[in-house]
Amino acid sequence: TLSDRLADTFKNLRGKGRLSEADIDATAREIRIALLEADVALPVVKEFVAAVKDRARGEEVSGALNPAQQIVKIVNEELVTILGGETRRLRYAKSGPTVILLAGLQGAGKTTLAAKLALWLKEQGKAPVLVAADLQRPNAVNQLQINGERAGVPVFAPEPGNGVGDPVAVARASIDEAKRKLYDVVIVDTAGRLGVDAELMQQAADIRDAVQPDEVLFVVDAMIGQDAVTTAQAFLEGVGFDGVVLTKLDGDARGGAALSIRSVTGKPVMFASAGEKLTDFDLFHPDRMAGRILDMGDMLTLIEQAEKTFDHEQALKAAEKLTGKGDFTLDDFLQQMQQVRKLGSMSKIMGMLPGMGQFRDQLENFDEREIDRIQAIIQSMTPAERDDPKIIDGSRRQRIARGSGRTVTDVNQLVDRFFEARKMMMQFAQGGGMPSLPGMPG
Ligand code: GDP
Ligand code: MG
Protein backbone atom coordinates (compact mmCIF):
# COMPACT_ATOMS: atom_id res chain seq x y z
CA THR A 1 0.00 0.00 0.00
CA LEU A 2 0.99 3.62 -0.29
CA SER A 3 1.47 3.94 3.45
CA ASP A 4 3.90 1.03 3.47
CA ARG A 5 5.85 2.43 0.55
CA LEU A 6 6.02 5.88 2.07
CA ALA A 7 7.16 4.41 5.35
CA ASP A 8 9.97 2.74 3.38
CA THR A 9 10.85 5.98 1.64
CA PHE A 10 11.28 7.69 4.98
CA LYS A 11 12.96 4.85 6.79
CA ASN A 12 16.14 6.83 7.17
CA LEU A 13 14.54 10.12 7.82
CA ARG A 14 14.06 11.07 11.43
CA GLY A 15 14.09 14.49 12.75
CA LYS A 16 13.04 18.01 12.48
CA GLY A 17 12.81 20.89 10.08
CA ARG A 18 11.44 20.54 6.60
CA LEU A 19 11.39 17.67 4.15
CA SER A 20 14.19 17.88 1.61
CA GLU A 21 13.54 18.28 -2.10
CA ALA A 22 14.78 14.72 -2.65
CA ASP A 23 12.33 13.38 -0.04
CA ILE A 24 9.49 15.25 -1.69
CA ASP A 25 10.41 13.89 -5.13
CA ALA A 26 10.56 10.35 -3.81
CA THR A 27 7.18 10.86 -2.18
CA ALA A 28 5.67 12.29 -5.35
CA ARG A 29 6.78 9.19 -7.25
CA GLU A 30 5.08 6.88 -4.76
CA ILE A 31 1.85 8.86 -4.75
CA ARG A 32 1.82 8.90 -8.53
CA ILE A 33 2.12 5.12 -8.68
CA ALA A 34 -0.57 4.65 -6.05
CA LEU A 35 -3.02 6.89 -7.88
CA LEU A 36 -2.37 5.25 -11.24
CA GLU A 37 -2.89 1.85 -9.63
CA ALA A 38 -6.23 3.12 -8.33
CA ASP A 39 -7.18 3.97 -11.93
CA VAL A 40 -7.06 7.73 -11.61
CA ALA A 41 -6.70 9.39 -15.02
CA LEU A 42 -3.17 10.60 -15.81
CA PRO A 43 -3.87 14.35 -16.17
CA VAL A 44 -5.67 14.26 -12.82
CA VAL A 45 -2.74 12.40 -11.25
CA LYS A 46 -0.29 15.01 -12.49
CA GLU A 47 -2.31 17.91 -11.18
CA PHE A 48 -2.86 16.24 -7.85
CA VAL A 49 0.77 15.30 -7.31
CA ALA A 50 1.86 18.85 -8.14
CA ALA A 51 -0.55 20.20 -5.51
CA VAL A 52 0.74 17.79 -2.88
CA LYS A 53 4.38 18.63 -3.66
CA ASP A 54 3.62 22.30 -3.25
CA ARG A 55 2.05 21.77 0.08
CA ALA A 56 4.72 19.37 1.34
CA ARG A 57 7.42 21.98 0.59
CA GLY A 58 5.84 24.50 2.90
CA GLU A 59 5.16 22.12 5.72
CA GLU A 60 7.17 21.80 8.92
CA VAL A 61 7.75 18.24 10.00
CA SER A 62 5.40 17.94 12.92
CA GLY A 63 6.31 16.55 16.30
CA ALA A 64 3.32 14.26 16.50
CA LEU A 65 3.83 12.45 13.20
CA ASN A 66 6.74 10.87 11.45
CA PRO A 67 7.44 12.17 7.92
CA ALA A 68 5.59 9.31 6.22
CA GLN A 69 2.52 9.88 8.36
CA GLN A 70 2.69 13.57 7.73
CA ILE A 71 2.77 13.14 3.96
CA VAL A 72 -0.09 10.67 4.10
CA LYS A 73 -2.03 13.22 6.09
CA ILE A 74 -1.43 15.93 3.49
CA VAL A 75 -2.33 13.57 0.65
CA ASN A 76 -5.48 12.51 2.42
CA GLU A 77 -6.60 16.05 3.14
CA GLU A 78 -6.01 17.09 -0.47
CA LEU A 79 -7.90 14.04 -1.71
CA VAL A 80 -10.88 14.72 0.51
CA THR A 81 -10.96 18.32 -0.66
CA ILE A 82 -10.80 17.35 -4.32
CA LEU A 83 -13.44 14.65 -3.85
CA GLY A 84 -15.80 17.34 -2.70
CA GLY A 85 -15.14 17.91 0.99
CA GLU A 86 -18.64 17.70 2.38
CA THR A 87 -21.16 15.32 0.87
CA ARG A 88 -23.43 17.14 -1.54
CA ARG A 89 -27.12 16.52 -0.68
CA LEU A 90 -30.06 16.16 -3.04
CA ARG A 91 -31.81 19.38 -3.91
CA TYR A 92 -35.57 19.10 -3.65
CA ALA A 93 -38.02 21.14 -5.73
CA LYS A 94 -39.49 24.14 -3.93
CA SER A 95 -42.97 23.19 -5.07
CA GLY A 96 -44.40 20.15 -6.80
CA PRO A 97 -42.59 16.84 -7.17
CA THR A 98 -38.80 16.68 -7.24
CA VAL A 99 -37.70 15.08 -10.50
CA ILE A 100 -34.52 13.01 -10.64
CA LEU A 101 -33.32 11.79 -14.02
CA LEU A 102 -30.83 8.91 -14.23
CA ALA A 103 -28.44 8.70 -17.16
CA GLY A 104 -25.56 6.40 -17.96
CA LEU A 105 -24.34 3.48 -20.07
CA GLN A 106 -26.16 0.18 -20.23
CA GLY A 107 -25.12 -2.01 -17.33
CA ALA A 108 -23.95 0.94 -15.23
CA GLY A 109 -26.55 0.06 -12.62
CA LYS A 110 -29.26 2.68 -13.28
CA THR A 111 -32.28 0.43 -12.85
CA THR A 112 -30.87 -1.12 -9.67
CA LEU A 113 -29.94 2.31 -8.40
CA ALA A 114 -33.39 3.73 -9.16
CA ALA A 115 -34.91 1.25 -6.71
CA LYS A 116 -32.17 1.78 -4.10
CA LEU A 117 -32.64 5.52 -4.23
CA ALA A 118 -36.43 5.12 -4.03
CA LEU A 119 -36.14 2.92 -0.94
CA TRP A 120 -33.69 5.34 0.66
CA LEU A 121 -36.07 8.25 0.03
CA LYS A 122 -39.05 6.29 1.28
CA GLU A 123 -37.21 5.58 4.52
CA GLN A 124 -36.83 9.33 4.93
CA GLY A 125 -40.54 9.82 4.72
CA LYS A 126 -40.73 10.71 1.03
CA ALA A 127 -43.28 9.29 -1.39
CA PRO A 128 -41.25 8.36 -4.46
CA VAL A 129 -42.42 6.90 -7.75
CA LEU A 130 -40.24 5.04 -10.26
CA VAL A 131 -40.68 5.76 -13.96
CA ALA A 132 -39.83 3.19 -16.61
CA ALA A 133 -38.54 5.31 -19.48
CA ASP A 134 -36.17 2.62 -20.74
CA LEU A 135 -38.11 1.05 -23.56
CA GLN A 136 -34.99 -0.06 -25.40
CA ARG A 137 -34.55 -3.51 -23.97
CA PRO A 138 -37.56 -5.84 -23.90
CA ASN A 139 -37.06 -6.74 -20.26
CA ALA A 140 -36.21 -3.29 -18.90
CA VAL A 141 -39.72 -2.30 -17.76
CA ASN A 142 -40.23 -5.65 -16.09
CA GLN A 143 -36.89 -5.35 -14.28
CA LEU A 144 -37.86 -1.97 -12.86
CA GLN A 145 -41.25 -3.33 -11.79
CA ILE A 146 -39.61 -6.21 -9.91
CA ASN A 147 -37.20 -3.82 -8.22
CA GLY A 148 -39.99 -1.40 -7.37
CA GLU A 149 -41.95 -4.19 -5.77
CA ARG A 150 -38.96 -5.18 -3.67
CA ALA A 151 -38.58 -1.60 -2.53
CA GLY A 152 -42.31 -1.22 -1.95
CA VAL A 153 -42.39 1.77 -4.28
CA PRO A 154 -44.93 2.26 -7.11
CA VAL A 155 -43.73 2.07 -10.72
CA PHE A 156 -45.15 4.13 -13.55
CA ALA A 157 -44.84 2.12 -16.77
CA PRO A 158 -45.98 2.49 -20.36
CA GLU A 159 -49.52 1.36 -21.11
CA PRO A 160 -52.24 2.74 -23.34
CA GLY A 161 -52.50 6.41 -22.41
CA ASN A 162 -49.01 6.50 -20.86
CA GLY A 163 -47.28 6.62 -24.25
CA VAL A 164 -46.55 3.06 -25.32
CA GLY A 165 -43.24 2.79 -27.13
CA ASP A 166 -42.24 6.41 -26.56
CA PRO A 167 -39.99 7.00 -23.54
CA VAL A 168 -40.36 10.78 -23.78
CA ALA A 169 -44.15 10.52 -23.64
CA VAL A 170 -43.98 8.08 -20.72
CA ALA A 171 -41.68 10.40 -18.81
CA ARG A 172 -43.89 13.41 -19.48
CA ALA A 173 -47.05 11.54 -18.44
CA SER A 174 -45.34 10.43 -15.21
CA ILE A 175 -45.05 14.00 -13.97
CA ASP A 176 -48.79 14.56 -14.30
CA GLU A 177 -49.42 11.26 -12.56
CA ALA A 178 -47.07 12.28 -9.70
CA LYS A 179 -48.92 15.57 -9.25
CA ARG A 180 -52.27 13.80 -9.29
CA LYS A 181 -51.25 11.13 -6.80
CA LEU A 182 -49.07 13.45 -4.69
CA TYR A 183 -45.83 11.56 -5.16
CA ASP A 184 -43.11 13.95 -4.11
CA VAL A 185 -40.06 12.44 -5.83
CA VAL A 186 -40.11 11.15 -9.41
CA ILE A 187 -37.16 8.93 -10.36
CA VAL A 188 -36.86 8.49 -14.11
CA ASP A 189 -34.91 5.41 -15.28
CA THR A 190 -33.63 5.73 -18.83
CA ALA A 191 -32.09 3.48 -21.46
CA GLY A 192 -28.37 3.11 -21.91
CA ARG A 193 -26.18 1.69 -24.65
CA LEU A 194 -23.01 -0.29 -24.33
CA GLY A 195 -21.00 2.65 -25.57
CA VAL A 196 -21.48 6.37 -25.97
CA ASP A 197 -23.97 6.83 -28.81
CA ALA A 198 -25.50 9.94 -30.40
CA GLU A 199 -29.01 8.55 -30.63
CA LEU A 200 -28.99 7.54 -26.99
CA MET A 201 -27.74 10.97 -25.91
CA GLN A 202 -30.50 12.59 -27.91
CA GLN A 203 -33.15 10.43 -26.28
CA ALA A 204 -31.86 11.22 -22.80
CA ALA A 205 -31.76 14.93 -23.66
CA ASP A 206 -35.34 14.78 -24.98
CA ILE A 207 -36.53 13.11 -21.78
CA ARG A 208 -34.65 15.78 -19.82
CA ASP A 209 -36.44 18.54 -21.71
CA ALA A 210 -39.80 16.83 -21.20
CA VAL A 211 -39.50 16.40 -17.42
CA GLN A 212 -37.31 19.38 -16.46
CA PRO A 213 -35.42 17.47 -13.76
CA ASP A 214 -34.26 19.08 -10.52
CA GLU A 215 -31.30 16.72 -10.54
CA VAL A 216 -29.71 14.75 -13.35
CA LEU A 217 -27.57 11.98 -11.92
CA PHE A 218 -24.90 10.33 -14.02
CA VAL A 219 -24.63 6.70 -12.98
CA VAL A 220 -21.26 5.06 -13.57
CA ASP A 221 -19.74 1.69 -12.84
CA ALA A 222 -16.62 2.18 -10.67
CA MET A 223 -15.09 -0.90 -12.28
CA ILE A 224 -14.67 0.73 -15.72
CA GLY A 225 -11.67 2.64 -14.40
CA GLN A 226 -10.00 4.99 -16.86
CA ASP A 227 -12.95 4.88 -19.29
CA ALA A 228 -15.07 6.64 -16.69
CA VAL A 229 -13.57 9.99 -17.66
CA THR A 230 -14.41 9.87 -21.37
CA THR A 231 -17.88 8.52 -20.64
CA ALA A 232 -18.52 11.22 -18.07
CA GLN A 233 -17.36 13.91 -20.48
CA ALA A 234 -19.64 12.59 -23.21
CA PHE A 235 -22.66 12.60 -20.90
CA LEU A 236 -21.81 16.04 -19.57
CA GLU A 237 -21.83 17.41 -23.12
CA GLY A 238 -24.73 15.29 -24.39
CA VAL A 239 -27.18 15.49 -21.50
CA GLY A 240 -25.51 17.44 -18.73
CA PHE A 241 -25.67 16.27 -15.12
CA ASP A 242 -25.57 17.69 -11.60
CA GLY A 243 -24.12 14.81 -9.69
CA VAL A 244 -22.56 11.40 -10.02
CA VAL A 245 -23.48 8.01 -8.58
CA LEU A 246 -20.70 5.43 -8.36
CA THR A 247 -21.91 1.85 -8.51
CA LYS A 248 -20.33 -1.56 -7.96
CA LEU A 249 -18.00 -0.31 -5.26
CA ASP A 250 -18.36 -3.75 -3.72
CA GLY A 251 -16.00 -4.94 -6.44
CA ASP A 252 -12.27 -4.54 -6.13
CA ALA A 253 -12.11 -1.20 -7.93
CA ARG A 254 -10.10 1.23 -5.82
CA GLY A 255 -12.37 4.09 -6.81
CA GLY A 256 -9.99 6.27 -8.78
CA ALA A 257 -12.94 6.98 -11.09
CA ALA A 258 -14.46 9.13 -8.36
CA LEU A 259 -11.42 11.37 -8.30
CA SER A 260 -11.10 11.56 -12.08
CA ILE A 261 -14.75 12.36 -12.73
CA ARG A 262 -14.91 14.95 -10.01
CA SER A 263 -11.74 16.66 -11.27
CA VAL A 264 -12.59 16.53 -14.96
CA THR A 265 -16.29 17.44 -14.81
CA GLY A 266 -16.35 19.47 -11.60
CA LYS A 267 -19.50 17.55 -10.60
CA PRO A 268 -19.70 15.99 -7.16
CA VAL A 269 -20.13 12.30 -6.48
CA MET A 270 -23.32 12.19 -4.43
CA PHE A 271 -24.12 8.54 -3.85
CA ALA A 272 -22.24 5.29 -3.66
CA SER A 273 -23.72 1.92 -4.46
CA ALA A 274 -21.97 -1.21 -3.30
CA GLY A 275 -23.91 -4.38 -3.95
CA GLU A 276 -26.96 -5.94 -5.52
CA LYS A 277 -29.15 -5.64 -2.42
CA LEU A 278 -31.40 -2.58 -2.31
CA THR A 279 -29.88 -1.49 0.98
CA ASP A 280 -26.31 -1.50 -0.39
CA PHE A 281 -26.49 2.21 -0.93
CA ASP A 282 -25.39 5.36 0.87
CA LEU A 283 -24.49 8.98 0.50
CA PHE A 284 -20.98 9.33 -0.87
CA HIS A 285 -18.37 10.05 1.79
CA PRO A 286 -15.24 11.75 0.40
CA ASP A 287 -13.16 10.80 3.44
CA ARG A 288 -13.95 7.10 3.11
CA MET A 289 -13.27 7.22 -0.61
CA ALA A 290 -9.92 8.93 -0.06
CA GLY A 291 -8.90 6.12 2.28
CA ARG A 292 -9.98 3.57 -0.30
CA ILE A 293 -8.21 5.17 -3.24
CA LEU A 294 -4.88 5.21 -1.45
CA ASP A 295 -5.59 2.05 0.53
CA MET A 296 -4.38 3.57 3.77
CA GLY A 297 -7.18 3.25 6.27
CA ASP A 298 -4.94 1.86 9.01
CA MET A 299 -2.39 4.62 8.66
CA LEU A 300 -5.11 7.25 8.88
CA THR A 301 -6.48 5.76 12.08
CA LEU A 302 -3.00 5.78 13.52
CA ILE A 303 -2.41 9.39 12.53
CA GLU A 304 -5.65 10.48 14.11
CA GLN A 305 -4.81 8.75 17.36
CA ALA A 306 -1.26 10.02 17.42
CA GLU A 307 -2.37 13.61 16.94
CA LYS A 308 -5.11 13.33 19.52
CA THR A 309 -2.80 12.12 22.22
CA PHE A 310 0.44 13.77 21.45
CA ASP A 311 1.50 16.51 23.75
CA HIS A 312 4.65 18.08 22.46
CA GLU A 313 5.64 19.76 25.71
CA GLN A 314 5.26 16.60 27.70
CA ALA A 315 7.30 14.60 25.27
CA LEU A 316 10.09 17.14 25.35
CA LYS A 317 10.11 17.15 29.12
CA ALA A 318 10.16 13.39 29.25
CA ALA A 319 13.03 13.30 26.79
CA GLU A 320 14.98 15.74 28.94
CA LYS A 321 14.37 13.60 31.97
CA LEU A 322 15.55 10.49 30.19
CA THR A 323 18.72 11.95 28.83
CA GLY A 324 19.39 14.15 31.84
CA LYS A 325 20.20 13.26 35.40
CA GLY A 326 17.57 10.59 35.54
CA ASP A 327 15.31 12.42 37.95
CA PHE A 328 12.29 10.44 36.84
CA THR A 329 9.67 11.07 39.52
CA LEU A 330 6.36 9.57 40.57
CA ASP A 331 4.61 12.50 38.88
CA ASP A 332 6.28 11.53 35.59
CA PHE A 333 5.30 7.95 36.21
CA LEU A 334 1.67 8.94 36.68
CA GLN A 335 1.72 11.22 33.66
CA GLN A 336 3.05 8.46 31.46
CA MET A 337 0.30 6.14 32.51
CA GLN A 338 -2.28 8.78 31.84
CA GLN A 339 -0.82 9.17 28.34
CA VAL A 340 -1.21 5.46 27.86
CA ARG A 341 -4.83 5.68 28.91
CA LYS A 342 -5.42 8.57 26.51
CA LEU A 343 -4.28 6.34 23.70
CA GLY A 344 -7.55 4.53 24.10
CA SER A 345 -7.69 1.16 22.46
CA MET A 346 -3.98 0.74 22.78
CA SER A 347 -3.86 -2.87 21.80
CA LYS A 348 -5.39 -2.05 18.45
CA ILE A 349 -2.96 0.73 17.78
CA MET A 350 0.02 -1.27 18.87
CA GLY A 351 -1.06 -4.11 16.63
CA MET A 352 -0.65 -1.79 13.68
CA LEU A 353 2.90 -0.80 14.48
CA PRO A 354 5.51 -3.19 13.24
CA GLY A 355 7.42 -4.86 16.04
CA MET A 356 4.94 -3.89 18.74
CA GLY A 357 3.12 -7.20 18.82
CA GLN A 358 5.13 -8.16 21.90
CA PHE A 359 3.27 -5.56 23.96
CA ARG A 360 -0.16 -6.67 22.92
CA ASP A 361 -0.66 -9.09 25.80
CA GLN A 362 0.37 -6.51 28.36
CA LEU A 363 -2.04 -4.04 26.87
CA GLU A 364 -4.93 -6.41 26.69
CA ASN A 365 -4.52 -7.17 30.39
CA PHE A 366 -4.28 -3.52 31.22
CA ASP A 367 -6.92 -2.45 33.72
CA GLU A 368 -7.94 1.18 33.35
CA ARG A 369 -9.18 1.44 36.92
CA GLU A 370 -5.67 0.63 38.02
CA ILE A 371 -4.62 4.09 36.89
CA ASP A 372 -7.27 5.68 39.12
CA ARG A 373 -6.03 3.70 42.11
CA ILE A 374 -2.43 4.64 41.42
CA GLN A 375 -3.42 8.25 40.96
CA ALA A 376 -5.18 8.31 44.34
CA ILE A 377 -2.10 6.93 46.06
CA ILE A 378 0.34 9.30 44.37
CA GLN A 379 -1.87 12.28 45.11
CA SER A 380 -1.84 11.42 48.80
CA MET A 381 1.92 11.93 48.87
CA THR A 382 3.73 15.21 49.50
CA PRO A 383 5.58 16.84 46.58
CA ALA A 384 8.89 15.89 48.15
CA GLU A 385 7.82 12.27 48.39
CA ARG A 386 6.71 12.25 44.77
CA ASP A 387 10.07 13.58 43.70
CA ASP A 388 11.94 10.97 45.66
CA PRO A 389 9.86 8.08 47.03
CA LYS A 390 12.91 6.74 48.88
CA ILE A 391 12.09 9.13 51.72
CA ILE A 392 8.68 7.53 52.37
CA ASP A 393 8.98 5.60 55.64
CA GLY A 394 6.64 3.09 57.29
CA SER A 395 4.39 5.56 59.09
CA ARG A 396 4.07 7.74 56.00
CA ARG A 397 3.06 4.64 54.01
CA GLN A 398 0.27 4.04 56.48
CA ARG A 399 -0.90 7.66 56.22
CA ILE A 400 -0.79 7.53 52.41
CA ALA A 401 -2.76 4.28 52.38
CA ARG A 402 -5.43 5.77 54.61
CA GLY A 403 -5.51 9.01 52.62
CA SER A 404 -6.08 7.20 49.36
CA GLY A 405 -8.38 4.48 50.65
CA ARG A 406 -5.90 1.74 49.70
CA THR A 407 -3.86 -0.72 51.76
CA VAL A 408 -0.23 -0.39 52.77
CA THR A 409 0.50 -3.33 50.47
CA ASP A 410 -0.92 -1.34 47.56
CA VAL A 411 1.37 1.57 48.44
CA ASN A 412 4.37 -0.73 48.71
CA GLN A 413 3.61 -2.35 45.37
CA LEU A 414 3.28 1.01 43.69
CA VAL A 415 6.59 2.24 45.04
CA ASP A 416 8.27 -1.00 43.92
CA ARG A 417 6.78 -0.69 40.45
CA PHE A 418 7.96 2.87 40.24
CA PHE A 419 11.55 1.91 41.06
CA GLU A 420 11.34 -0.88 38.50
CA ALA A 421 10.03 1.52 35.85
CA ARG A 422 12.70 4.07 36.68
CA LYS A 423 15.40 1.48 36.28
CA MET A 424 14.05 0.61 32.86
CA MET A 425 13.78 4.22 31.80
CA MET A 426 17.42 4.70 32.77
CA GLN A 427 18.48 1.71 30.71
CA PHE A 428 16.49 3.06 27.80
CA ALA A 429 18.08 6.47 28.13
CA GLN A 430 21.50 4.86 28.05
CA GLY A 431 20.66 3.11 24.81
CA GLY A 432 19.33 -0.16 26.13
CA GLY A 433 16.42 -0.25 23.73
CA MET A 434 12.74 0.25 24.12
CA PRO A 435 11.60 -0.13 27.72
CA SER A 436 8.56 -2.03 28.78
CA LEU A 437 5.67 0.34 29.22
CA PRO A 438 5.71 1.90 32.67
CA GLY A 439 3.04 0.75 35.04
CA MET A 440 2.25 -2.30 33.01
CA PRO A 441 1.80 -5.65 34.67
CA GLY A 442 4.13 -8.43 33.59
P1 GDP B 1 -28.59 -0.46 -16.08
O1 GDP B 1 -28.42 -1.12 -17.40
O2 GDP B 1 -27.78 0.80 -15.98
O3 GDP B 1 -30.01 -0.23 -15.72
O4 GDP B 1 -27.96 -1.43 -14.99
P2 GDP B 1 -28.70 -2.48 -14.05
O5 GDP B 1 -29.31 -1.79 -12.90
O6 GDP B 1 -29.58 -3.36 -14.86
O7 GDP B 1 -27.45 -3.29 -13.50
C1 GDP B 1 -26.64 -4.08 -14.36
C2 GDP B 1 -26.08 -5.23 -13.53
O8 GDP B 1 -25.24 -4.77 -12.51
C3 GDP B 1 -27.16 -6.03 -12.85
O9 GDP B 1 -26.82 -7.39 -12.91
C4 GDP B 1 -27.14 -5.54 -11.42
O10 GDP B 1 -27.58 -6.53 -10.51
C5 GDP B 1 -25.68 -5.22 -11.24
N1 GDP B 1 -25.44 -4.18 -10.25
C6 GDP B 1 -26.01 -2.95 -10.17
N2 GDP B 1 -25.49 -2.24 -9.14
C7 GDP B 1 -24.57 -3.03 -8.55
C8 GDP B 1 -23.66 -2.87 -7.44
O11 GDP B 1 -23.58 -1.83 -6.76
N3 GDP B 1 -22.86 -3.92 -7.13
C9 GDP B 1 -22.90 -5.08 -7.86
N4 GDP B 1 -22.08 -6.07 -7.52
N5 GDP B 1 -23.71 -5.26 -8.92
C10 GDP B 1 -24.54 -4.26 -9.26
MG1 MG C 1 -31.70 -0.39 -16.80
Image: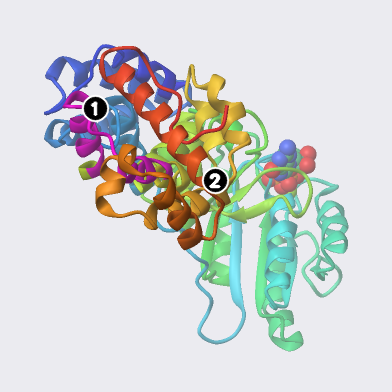
Horizontal and vertical percent for residue 267?
A: 41, 52
Does the rendering let one see residue 291? yes
Kindly indicate the quadrant of the structure image that contains residue 199.
top right
Kindly indicate the quadrant of the structure image that contains residue 44.
top left
Say which element carries label 2.
Answer: helix
Q: Which residue corresponds to mark 2? A: 410
Tell me how many marks there are. Answer: 2
- Magenta-highlighted residues: 314-337
Does the rendering let one see residue 269? no
Check the image and report above or below for 74 versus 117: above
Taking the magenta stretch, the answer to whether it contains residue 323 is yes
Q: Are marks 2 and 1 in contact (CB under 8 Å)?
A: no
Which residue sits at x=69%, y=77%?
Answer: 126
Magenta: main secondary structure: helix
Q: Which residue corresponds to mark 1? A: 322
Q: How is the image coloured?
A: rainbow
